[in-house]
Image (cartoon, rainbow, N blue to C red):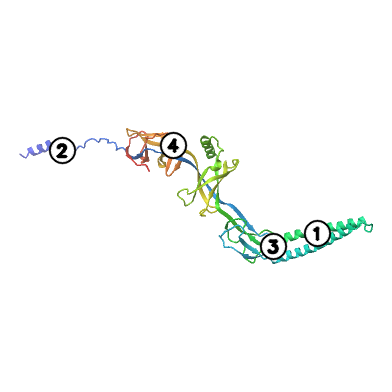
Amino acid sequence: MRASRPLAALCLLPLLALQSCPEPNKFVPPPPPKVGVQTPVVKDLTNYAEFTGNTQGIFRVEIRARVRGFLQEIRFKPGDIVDKDSPLFLIDPRPFQATLAGAKAELASRQADLDLAKTNVEKLESVTSGAVSEIQKIEARARRDIAKAAVQAAEAKVTQAQLDLDYTDIKSPIHGRISRNLVDVGNLVGSGESTLLAEVINDDEMYAYFDISEDVLLEALDARAQEQGSARKGIKKTKVFLARMTDTDYPFEGNLDYVDPALSIETGTLRARALFKNPDYLLFAGLFVKLRIPIKEIQGALLVPTVALGQDQQGRFLLVVGEDGVVDRKNVVAGFQRDGLTLIRSGIGNDDKVIVRGIQRARPGGKVVTEALQAN
């Protein structure tokens, strides 16, 4: 019986060996990656050209001292809205009043000399006998003419003295917003130069200056020619929309007011100006602003999320998924961007499933599992 136990153990060895041998490995391919897709957004929209620029008041006037004297009064508060002819500054008028009085006195004296000279001429010319020679008459007429010229010179001095006196009372030449005073009361102004006292800016309306690039200009001219038959027709009726740096939209609407007659050779741009109403004074001169001009109406435009666009040496492209789940690359011609979407001018169709999420996991020719996303 003891001899049979080793024999039984030997018989069990093949069975144990079979149980301890692992099965051969089999390759199981990973599942296709999951991507988010959506079809292009189809809508009618307007193609806008966008620019940056700066605002400027339609009238900007420097208030300067036109006569020499001591500044006596300031008759406004900085930042006030002033009307045309509103008093702003007063230069001490007393020296000019004295000069005017002296000029008027001199004029009166010259006028008296003229009256006397006229009387003498009349008396001499009334004498018909030979008691008065022709020479005497000629001399009397000459003295009369000299007196007349002296009166005219005295009148000019009175006029100039009156102007200088008027210049001491400085008034606003336009309606607008005035700056702070640049000179304080008590200072001597107008000494050797026309001292700058303040500035008045009329901002009831506001200009916005900006530069149009050559390619945008040509696109706009082509679009205008197609719509109106002439690129020049109604250029001042072109609408322009303006936004400040804090605006999320373009709340100000104006019109193109002026464009330079020629492109700048140095920059390849055209200087333009738009005019905007500013009744609530929400625009200030010197603001950095954004502007846009409608160029062309596009019917049935195709828009895709900008994040879906790729670019390499071959150009811009989109990855789309076919009915069989295979990824395909499509080269496209892209247009302008707006609100996170990009216009696709050519390269895809309305029903193409564009990969917009998980793009890094998709490869042309590979399979993917799609998840339909709703377009914003």
3 and 1 marks in contact (CB < 8 Å): no
Above or below for 161 versus 41: below
Quadrant containing the N terminus in the rendered view: top left
Question: Which amino acid type corresponds to the residue marked 3 in the rendered image?
Answer: Leu
- Horizontal relation, residue 251 to residue 22: left or right: right
Query: Disc 3 or 1, which lies upstream in sequence?
Result: 1
Above or below for 130 versus 293: below
Query: Disc 1 or 4, which lies upstream in sequence?
Result: 1
Q: Can residue 270 be seen in this view?
A: yes
Q: Distance between the residues labelled 1 and 4?
A: 82 Å
The x and y percentages for residue 55 are: 55, 50
Of labels 1 and 2, the one closer to you: 1
The numbered dot on residue 165 is 3
3 and 4 marks in contact (CB < 8 Å): no
The x and y percentages for residue 233 are: 56, 38
Q: How far apart are marks 3 and 4 (CA)?
A: 68 Å
Look at mark 2 in the image and give the residue it sits on. 16
Give the secondary structure at mark 3.
Answer: helix
Q: How far apart are marks 4 and 2 (CA)?
A: 78 Å
Look at mark 1 in the image and give the residue it sits on. 150
Give the secondary structure at mark 4.
Answer: strand
Question: Which amino acid type corresponds to the residue marked 4 in the rendered image?
Answer: Gln
Of labels 3 and 4, the one closer to you: 3
Name the residue nearer the viewer: 260 or 14.
260
The numbered dot on residue 126 is none
Look at mark 4 in the image and give the residue it sits on. 299
